[in-house]
Amino acid sequence: MTEEFDVAIVGSGPAGLTAAIYTARAALNPLVLEGEPSSTSDQPGGQLMMTTDVENYPGFPDGILGPELMANFRAQAVRFGAQIETVKVTKVDFSARPFKLWVGAETDGDPTYLANTVIVSTGAKALMLGLENEERLVGHGVSTCATCDGFFFRDQDIAVVGGGDSALEEAGFLTRFAKSVTIIVRRDELRASKIMQERARNNDKITFLWNTEVAEILGDEALTGVNVKNNVTGETSQLDITGLFVAIGHVPNTQLFEGQLAMKDNGYLITQSPSSRTSVEGVFACGDVQDDIYRQAITASGSGCTAAIDAERWLEAHHDGNSEH
Ligand code: NDP
């Protein structure tokens, strides 16, 4: 039977769960469709589930682990009455209100949920290099998540690809386990913030391979090494490593909304700044799915609050709320 809600929140990272806390405290009984774990890089709770220490989220002077922070967000949303379902939305129809949402494989019949407003907070996911063997060896030496997999590389020689904050953060974390960590950077400089650069440069276990790209990922059952190419000299060489962590950026999770919500060329949702309004009235977006600039947990969280207040005001203005549910 189709259930109807005033607010359906799709996604459960800092943005979605902050929206849940705010709408729950506004007595809107939100439904949170938190997603389903399908791989290490795709699980409820979003990207912080794959992070270790979060040191820049205000309120935690000693830092907090990403998964612990997300468990706190979730418990806070539940405490105020948010209904959280561990399901993945597979289809939406935003052409008329109430909006329709389906979960599961069966998307031809009646929608699973109807919602007067929808808050989209589906986040972004890790980019891969696109090389042969890469996907096949995920979980067998190739990883996008140091937190999840670092433990398996105790006393081993491993590498991280990328030159941004993610790459340096992952590399630093991995030095807790690995014998050595080589950071493979495609240019002769890093994109990462100065403080992260300094930390990495001061870490004895970390070395940098500049102007270098991964040309080939080697291994049958498990990763045995990579062939790398210096893109200035053209020189190639083999790195004997048993772990390769890919940390080269993210793509927004917006495929579900193609043709329904306006997007930028890079696939991120367009919101009407300074609000969280999307191109469809009554549908709001927050967090990384609409933010290709700041992409921080705290900015995601802040925008989740914005979306909750926008949804609440929209329901009030339209008097077609369904708050008895
Ligand atoms: P970024 O987009 O910042 O960096 C991606 C890095 O990967 C760049 O160095 C880029 O190289 C490189 N790269 C991209 N594609 C390839 C490829 N095919 N082969 C080799 N290298 C490639 O992504 P991040 O995930 O690092 O960070 C995203 C955002 O999140 C940033 O704003 C960052 O500051 C923030 N962040 C903050 C953290 C913190 O404060 N603790 C931790 C993690 C992320 P190039 O520079 O040449 O383009």
Image (cartoon, rainbow, N blue to C red):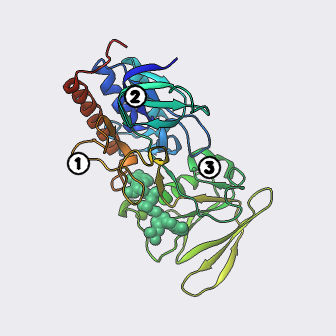
**How far apart are labels 3 and 2 at the CA level?**
35 Å
Number of residues whose C-alpha sits closer than 10 Å to that of mark 2, classed few (under 14), some (14–19) or many (20 or more): many
Q: CA distance from mark 3 to mark 1?
A: 39 Å
Between 186 and 209, the one nearer to me in the picture: 186
- In what quadrant does ligand 1 lie? bottom left
Q: Earlier in the sequence, mark 2 or mark 1?
A: 2
- The response on whether ligand 1 sits within 8 Å of label 3 is no
| Quadrant housing residue 131 | bottom right
The quarter of the rendered structure image containing the C terminus is top left
Packing grade of label 1 (10 A; few <14, some 14-19, many >=20) is few
Badge 3 crowding class, 10 Å Cα cut-off, few under 14, some 14 to 19, many 20 or more, is many
Mark 2 and 1 residues: CB-CB less than 8 Å, in contact? Answer: no
Amino acid at dot 2: Ala
Which of the pair 323/79 is nearer the observer? 323
Tell us which disc is closer to us: 3 or 1.
1
* Farthest top residue in view: 324
Label 3 element class: helix
Give the side of residue 45 with respect to residue 96, left or right.
Answer: right
In this rendering, position of residue 199 left or right of residue 279: right
On the image, numbered disc 2 is attached to which residue? 8
Residue situated in front as seen by the camera: 169 or 140 = 140
Q: What residue is shown with label 3?
A: 150
Is residue 161 toward the left or the right of residue 254 in the image?
right
Three-letter amino acid code at the position of disc 1: Ser
The residue positioned 21% from the left and 28% from the top of the image is 313
Query: In the image, which disc is placed on residue 273?
Result: 1
Residue at image x 57%, y 50%?
146
Determine whether, in the image, residue 156 is placed left or right of residue 115. right
Question: Looking at the image, can residue 165 be seen?
Answer: no
